Every structure is written in structure tokens, then in C-alpha cells.
Amino acid sequence: MPTTSGRGPTSWPTVPTSRRTGRWTAGRPSTAGGSPDRKNAVRRHAPDRPKCAGKLGGAMRRASSARALFGQTLGRHRSPRHVAFVGGATNVPAIEMLRATGFEGEIWTVHPTRTELAGCTVYPSVNDLPAAPDAAFLNVPKGAINGLLRDLDARGAGGAVCFAAGYAELGEAGVAEQAELSGAAGDLAVMGPNSTGFLNYFDRTALWPVHDHEPRQVEKGVAIVSASGGVLFNYSINQRSLRAAVMIGVGNQAVLEIADYVAVLAGNPRVTAIGLFMEDIGDPVAFSHAAAQALERGVPVVALKTGATAKGAEVAQTHSGALVAPADMNNALFS
């Protein structure tokens, strides 16, 4: 799995002092024009487009160069050298979970008023961190997310888990807010929003909101990519004969999609199989290509697809904002 995004630790840009903030503030106003449509607004933008251009475009506008970029930063994101937790006391279990994995990198915390959190030094803003973090866990009110993403992107950070919910799953207004988040992400590899984060036992890393079990070192094992945090929590806390090495909660997939995770995992020789709990496929062309790559490398892909009925599709939409394709189309793809 790639471990570098191409932006080395000596090349991070200097962030002007004027951008520093002393309190959690709402994200800066978007320059987006028009009302994003449901189909296209919640997906990622190509990095060579204006960061807050109106409609973010569908599958044809997500160029292959963007997918390659996210593939690289995703690898850095899941095998970080330093991690920043942004938020208050609710991050303590997440910090404890990271430590329990045996993580050997640096742990930083960010809060505008605290001076200590879980034994870590607290910095007033992401712009005050010693360096651009490889990964950040954003556990803050939704209104602060976009500004944080812009600041992390400007510093050259690798990626972020967006734990906040209340986006496309709430309907049209939430779809528009999710489009703004996608624009604010810039070149960041963003999981979510509405994501439970990830566990990576290969590299002793976790951005996981709870310390609900004791991690174990795994040399080889399966990877589980899920639209349901509940499925991941259940799997992580139970003893299984099939050892899970990586667990990823995709959330609403505003930036990174299931296809991106499959593509990166398929290239990791330690992954023996990939399990998917899916509500929607997202980009079917990209997903088909990623799944074919996995099969060519001898990595089975097993998918549990929900939303086969009208009621199931409705539940998926209110859970993660997923737009579920008709069952016959999904069956044709998987067959």
C-alpha cells in the first residue's frame, strides 16, 4: 500500500497567521452557484477544478488522475506517522484506542481553549500543529468542518475522518451542505461525513471513536469496508475465526467512495479478501475496475448489498444519503 502522497514533510506551505481561529467557527462561505442536484452533488470533485464550483459533477468528471491522487493519499492516511484529534473530551476514547493498537507515531490534539487532553499537548488550531498531520479525526460540530478541511488541505495534510453527521441523509438541504464539504476538502482524502473511521491492525493504527476492544496485531487478514458502523462495531468486538485486519466505515462517501478503498486494498499483499457491506455502488465503472483488479490479484471480493426493495432503498437514503440503483441493475453488475 502506498505510504506517501508526494508532498513531503519539508514542503508543506506556510499558512498565514490571519487564517488562525480562536474558536470553532462555521466553515467559510462557499462560492458555489446554483442548487446541486442529488445525483451529482455528493460526489468528489477533480482536484484541477475550482474547489467550490457549483455542481461537483458525476462519474465522467471524476478524472482518472483524481482517482490516482486519492489512492496515494489514502495509503498515507491509513498508515500515518502523526495523527491529530480535533475536538474535546469526546476524543479521549479514540485516543485511547489508537494507543492500544501500539501506534508509534506522534499524537496531537486540537482545541481552542483546552491545555491538556488525554495526556497530549493541545494546540489551538490545526495551523499551530508542528507539521501537517498524515491523518486527522474531526470530532467537532458540523459547522466547523469545512473550515478545518480547508486549513488541513492548505497545510498539505494527508486525510481526515469526518465523524459529524447531518448531511445528505437529511434530504435536499443536507445534500447541498455535503457538496460544500466535498469542495472544501480540496486534495484531502476524506472519509465520511457520517463515518465511524477505520481500524488498521496491519500498521497498528486506528481512527475509531470508541475504545471498545483490545486490538490485535495481524500479519494477514481480510478487510471489511462498510456503509454501516454498527456492522463494523459488531465485527470488531467479537471473536471471529476469520481474522479482520482492516475495517473502514465509508459514511456518506462525499469524497472517497467504496471503489477507492477496494482499489487500494486490492494492492496490499497482506489483504486476503475484501468484504463489502454496501448501500449504493457510487461510480459503477470505477467499482467494476477496482473489483476486477482485486480478482486478478487473487483477492476475493464478497459484497452484501442492501436496499433491494423500495423500503430498503428509502432506509439507505435516510441512513447515509445513498442513492440506490434498481435491484436488477445491481444484480447485472455483480453477475
Image: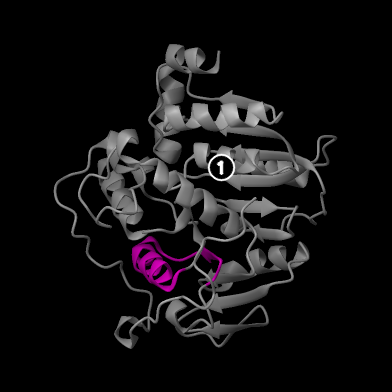
Q: With respect to residue 244, does 195 lie above or below?
A: below
Q: Residue at x 40, y 33 (%)?
A: 317
Residue that badge 1 annotates: 261
- The residue closer to the viewer here, 194 or 288, is 288
Number of marks present in the image shown: 1
Residue 144 on the magenta span: yes
Is residue 256 shown to the viewer in this render? yes
- The residue closer to the viewer here, 134 or 319, is 134
Q: Amino acid at mark 1?
A: Tyr
**Residue 329 is drawn in which quadrant?**
top left
Image x and y of residue 189, in percent: 47, 55
- The residue closer to the viewer here, 228 or 256, is 256
Relative to residue 84, is residue 219 drawn left or right? Answer: right
Is residue 192 shown to the viewer in this render? no
Q: With respect to residue 134, does 309 lie above or below?
A: above
Q: Residue at x 47, y 76 (%)?
A: 11
Q: With respect to residue 260, does 28 lie above or below?
A: below
Quadrant containing the C terminus is: top right
Q: Residue at x 20, y 49 (%)?
A: 54
Residue 232 on the magenta span: no
Relative to residue 309, is residue 230 drawn left or right? Answer: right
Image x and y of residue 57, in percent: 27, 40
Image x and y of residue 98, in percent: 69, 64
Image x and y of residue 238, in percent: 79, 42
Q: Residues within 10 Å of mark 1 (few under 14, many from 20)?
A: many
Relative to residue 91, is residue 143 drawn left or right? Answer: left
What are the residue bounds of the magenta stretch?
133-156
- Farthest residue toward the left? 34
Q: Secondary structure at mark 1?
A: helix
Colour convention: one colour
